[in-house]
Amino acid sequence: MRKSSIAALALLIGAAALLVSGADLEVRLRAKDAQARTGADAGVFWEEGSSELATGRPDSLAELAATLSPAVVNIRSERHPPAPSGKQSPFEEFFGRRRPPRGEAGGTGFVISKDGYIVTNHHVVDGAARVMVTFANDKEYTAEIVGVDPKTDLGLIKIDAGEDLPHAPLGDSSDTRVGDWVMAIGNPFGLEHTVTVGILSARGRRIGTGPYDNFLQTDASINPGNSGGPLIDMNGRVIGINTAINAAGQGIGFAIPINMAKDLLPQLREKGSVTRGWLGVQIQRVTPAFADQYDLDSTAGAVVSQVFEGSPAAKAKLERGDVIIEFDGSKIESFNDLPRKVASVPPGTEVPVLVIRDGKPKTLRAKLDTMEEEKAVQLTSREPTESSKWGFEANGLTRELAEQLSLPSGTEGVVVTRVAPGSPSSKAGLESNDVIVEANRTTIQDLEDLDAVLAEDPSQLVLFIQRRGSSLYIALEQS
């Protein structure tokens, strides 16, 4: 045999060997026996899952679907008539439809413990007079609503099956990466136990449902009826709860990260509702202009634009202009992180708060209060719009004008009387009747103070203003 033929044959054999070894290295989905955490994890009642690290997609997902499907249930809610107010939840608004006044509604859930606790969405069981749960083997049970949290659209129900139930192990959503393969199991349009597959498309999505928005985005097909079903990684662990879709798009679905749910489930089981911590600050994003003006190394963190009187933040000596970069040991990468971190800490807990003040780090300690409904609006973050160039007119603040604008007694500053359309001020969000009390860290008592700041011809202008009882920073930039 010629040497070239022998070499070619050897190459083919080598390639075949590589294919075989590659097949042998294919990830096997073996969800290990779930074990409940004990000891330090007081309050945990679900099953945790762990397995070998997955490095790719297997040839078939049949084993994964067969393993998890018995733990997924179809939920039918027989509903009461709507409340007289007729109000929609943010999640109903996002879906673009209201809850039917009466009759049945469908959704999905999944068992998280062998004694029958089931996770679903709040909007699946909201207003239900009776909740029925059906398994893949057609066994049906009446469920009790244990607890709900409308703010995160989380629901916990329970059935008494008289036997140990198959349950889905919960994973760690912080371990997931954009591009990882995921599977969704649910009941879209009443088509029971439908399995779809896709990837994790994005993390940390905000869809306008409230201050705790932090959704996983996936292109795994999700439709009405999937709500409350599990989003599963290739290790056979639940990493999210399918919650919402973008009706105007294809392949755009959103899931609650399972880590957020794990923070709240113990409270739902014990109390039926969630009590959140309250710090008592109004915050906004750190813009590049603000970071430059205040000598910050990055745009990470949350700017304190207002500290509410008598709040835990006030007692901890937080100040307007502080930039919170860590809360209770967790880094605040974006200003959106802070409301979720604060809300996850039980009231009465004293936590360290690391801030940057005058360019230097400072650690304060705050003992959180209870988040009440009337306080919730005070936690809402404000985000200014970045821009480039001035374009506003201002007048001195008279006593009569201060009374007309309902400003606190003794307020000093200048009033914005006109904002030019299309100008940097307009683009930055400055509005007529805004009261400028500070510009580039200089207190503004009258027009002369403002003129002095503008006379320096700064490349950036950071204004601190009062607007309808709220305080916020607005950053303007020159081109």
Image: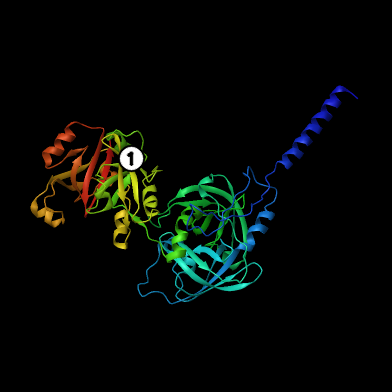
Q: Quadrant of the C terminus?
A: top left
Q: Quadrant of the N terminus?
A: top right
The one nearer the camera, 260 or 416, is: 260
Tell whether 449 sits left or right of 387.
left
The one nearer the camera, 113 or 80, is: 113
Q: Secondary structure at mark 1?
A: loop
| Residue in the image at 52% along x and 57% along y | 241
The extreme top residue here reads: 3
Residue 384 shows in the view = no
Rendered image quadrant of residue 52: top right
The one nearer the camera, 290 or 166, is: 166
| Residue in the image at 28% along x and 50% along y | 281
Colouring mode (rainbow / by chain / secondary structure / one colour): rainbow
Question: With respect to residue 428, does 347 lie above or below?
Answer: below
Tell whether 35 sits left or right of 451.
right
Q: Position of residue 237 (x, y in %)?
A: 59, 53
| Residue in the image at 81% along x and 33% along y | 13
Rendered image quadrant of residue 150: bottom left
Question: With respect to residue 105, does 328 lie above or below?
Answer: above
The one nearer the camera, 86 or 302, is: 302
Count neighbours of disc 1 (C-alpha within 10 A) and say few if under 14, some if 14 to 19, many if 20 or more. Answer: many
Residue 201 shows in the view = yes
Question: With respect to residue 132, does 299 lie above or below?
Answer: above
Q: Look at mark 1 in the image and give the residue it sits on.
A: 287
Q: Position of residue 316 (x, y in %)?
A: 26, 47
Q: Position of residue 47 (x, y in %)?
A: 56, 57
Q: Which amino acid, mark 1?
A: Thr
Tell whether 383 sits left or right of 121.
left
Q: Position of residue 218 (x, y in %)?
A: 54, 51
